[in-house]
């Protein structure tokens, strides 16, 4: 319940306004003097202050000014009996969030208080997220507080101390290269090079030369000799991304290089030693690839000494808002000063709810893209629902989360029923008679529930 403090030296007015606010679900309090209100604000916690201007002793504008200087995130709404330009300018200079004219119209007061309370909640959420960002475990650019990510961080910390080969698995966009960089930066090889290559992006005819190098004249365009990535990574870490996409004929050569710690450049007659830590990554099921003959089992054993499995973003609970705030700060800092729009500070509660409920098939990469788009479209100091892509704001989850570590993922009973009815109808092709039988209700009851849940 938003806590509101009313300040007016006319007690009956305070009682009437407090009753109106209480009827709308606010926790309404009042003081009949600005001095007492100032003491109360310093010792108590309020979401909004409404103060009259004309009072004996300290007036409302002075109270507003003190509150704004001491607690700039506490919105103050000024009430005045003189709606003139001078009073409005004075209220704004004192730091007022809004001002209302006497006699108070509750139809204007209630929405004004609700907007101010919403702003206060947003400010608090932004501060909470920024504290969480400061406190969150960071491994390089990896960020998260969920139990799934804490397990990943613990494994990274332990494996970084050795030279064992690491296989990083996870869906596209989960941050597999960030894991590889984090392992490198925490290892004894941190001062050496970190060399990364996407195996799927190199043409099959060039992959051997790219990895092992070549001598002059080895092929038509080989005008000079060139070290391969294994030798370039000497003393550091070689990261082979999308290793599951390596051509089958290249896999035994890679296996030999990993076993012997030596490579033979294309066209050379002798081998070259290398000393590099090997980290590989894939979004494929390599065990299934072994079963269907597209990946060598012995190579899998060689690269999969320690496996780090990155969870998808949808399994990381509140990390999604933590990451969203991180991208707001990061991208906002880059764009600051480019136009006259207010800098976006955080996420509106409605938009946060949409971001939490979306499943993020593109994971962290998709979230960053979404936040960048929202910042480009935002016209307020926060991201609102309309700033989000259609697929995020219109998303309706089909699955009900029952087992969850994050309480924010749990659903109200009505929402569970709505999603279940919608899923049954989808599976039955919209046949309401069959749906009623499956749900164990008659058709009239089903129609009432469809209407109640907006599914009719």
Image (cartoon, grey):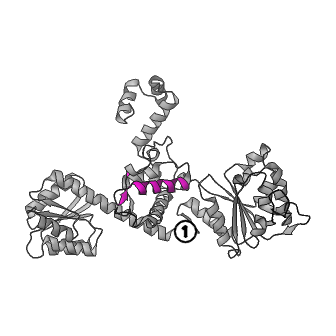
Residue appearing at x 41%, y 46% in the figure:
412
Judging from the image, what secondary structure is the residue with disc 1 in?
strand
- Nearer to me, 91 or 357: 91
Q: Position of residue 227 (x, y in %)?
A: 79, 67
Q: Which residues are magenta?
A: 365-385
- Nearer to me, 430 or 439: 430
Identity of the residue furthest to the top in this view: 433
Residue appearing at x 55%, y 53% in the figure:
363
Residue appearing at x 20%, y 67% in the figure:
92
Question: Is 446 above or below relative to 216?
Answer: above
Identity of the residue furthest to the right in this view: 269
420 is within the stretch colored magenta: no
Q: Is residue 136 left or right of residue 278?
A: left
- Nearer to me, 122 or 446: 122
* Res 199 → quadrant: bottom right
382 is within the stretch colored magenta: yes
Q: Position of residue 422 (x, y in %)?
A: 45, 34
Disc 1: which residue = 137
Magenta stretch, overall SS: helix
Q: Quadrant of the N terminus?
A: bottom left
Question: Is 447 above or below relative to 252?
Answer: above
Q: Position of residue 386 (x, y in %)?
A: 38, 49
Is residue 76 among what the camera can see? yes
Q: Position of residue 366 (x, y in %)?
A: 53, 52
* Res 291 → quadrant: top right
Is residue 52 among what the camera can see? no
Q: Residues within 10 Å of mark 1 (few under 14, many from 20)?
A: some
Q: Quadrant of the C terminus?
A: top left
Residue appearing at x 26%, y 70% in the figure:
44
Q: Is residue 101 left or right of residue 349?
A: left
């Amino acid at each position: 319940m938003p806590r509101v403090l009313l300040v007016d030296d006319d007690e009956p007015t305070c009682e009437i306004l407090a009753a109106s606010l209480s009827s709308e679900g606010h926790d309404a309090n009042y003081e009949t003097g600005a001095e007492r209100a100032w003491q109360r604000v310093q010792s108590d916690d309020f979401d909004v202050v409404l103060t009259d201007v004309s009072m004996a002793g300290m007036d409302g504008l002075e109270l507003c000014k003190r509150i704004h200087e001491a607690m700039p995130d506490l919105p103050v709404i000024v009430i005045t009996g003189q709606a003139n330009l001078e009073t409005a300018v004075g209220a704004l200079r004192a730091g007022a969030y809004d001002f209302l004219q006497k006699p108070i119209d509750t139809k204007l007061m209630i929405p004004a208080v609700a907007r101010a309370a919403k702003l206060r909640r947003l400010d608090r959420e932004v501060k909470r997220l920024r504290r969480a960002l400061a406190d969150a475990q960071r491994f390089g650019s990896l960020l998260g507080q969920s139990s799934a990510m804490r397990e990943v961080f613990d494994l990274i910390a332990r494996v970084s101390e050795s030279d064992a080969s690491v296989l990083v698995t996870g869906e596209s966009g989960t941050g597999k290269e960030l894991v590889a960089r984090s392992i490198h930066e925490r290892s004894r090889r941190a001062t050496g090079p970190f060399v990364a290559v996407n195996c799927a992006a190199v043409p099959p005819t060039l992959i051997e030369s790219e990895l092992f190098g070549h001598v002059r004249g080895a092929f038509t365009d080989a005008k000079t000799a060139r070290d391969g990535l294994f030798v370039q990574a000497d003393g550091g870490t070689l990261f082979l991304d999308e290793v599951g996409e390596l051509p089958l004929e290249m896999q035994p050569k890679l296996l030999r290089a990993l076993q012997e710690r030596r490579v033979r450049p294309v066209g050379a007659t002798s081998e070259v030693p290398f000393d590099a830590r090997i980290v590989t990554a894939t979004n494929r099921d390599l065990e299934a690839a072994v079963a269907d003959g597209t990946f060598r089992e012995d190579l899998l054993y060689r690269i999969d000494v320690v496996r780090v499995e990155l969870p998808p973003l949808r399994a990381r609970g509140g990390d999604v808002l933590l990451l969203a705030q991180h991208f707001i700060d990061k991208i906002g800092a880059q764009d600051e000063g480019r136009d006259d729009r207010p800098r976006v500070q955080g996420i509106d509660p409605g938009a946060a709810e949409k971001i939490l409920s979306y499943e993020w098939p593109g994971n962290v990469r998709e979230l960053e893209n979404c936040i960048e788009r929202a910042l480009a479209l935002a016209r307020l100091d926060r991201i609102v629902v309309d700033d989000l892509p259609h697929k995020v704001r219109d998303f309706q989850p089909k699955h009900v989360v029952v087992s969850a570590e994050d309480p924010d993922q749990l659903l109200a009973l009505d929402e569970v029923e709505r999603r279940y009815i919608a899923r049954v109808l989808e599976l039955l092709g919209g046949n309401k008679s069959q749906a009623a039988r499956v749900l164990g209700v008659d058709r009239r009851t089903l129609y009432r529930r469809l209407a109640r849940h907006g599914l009719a």
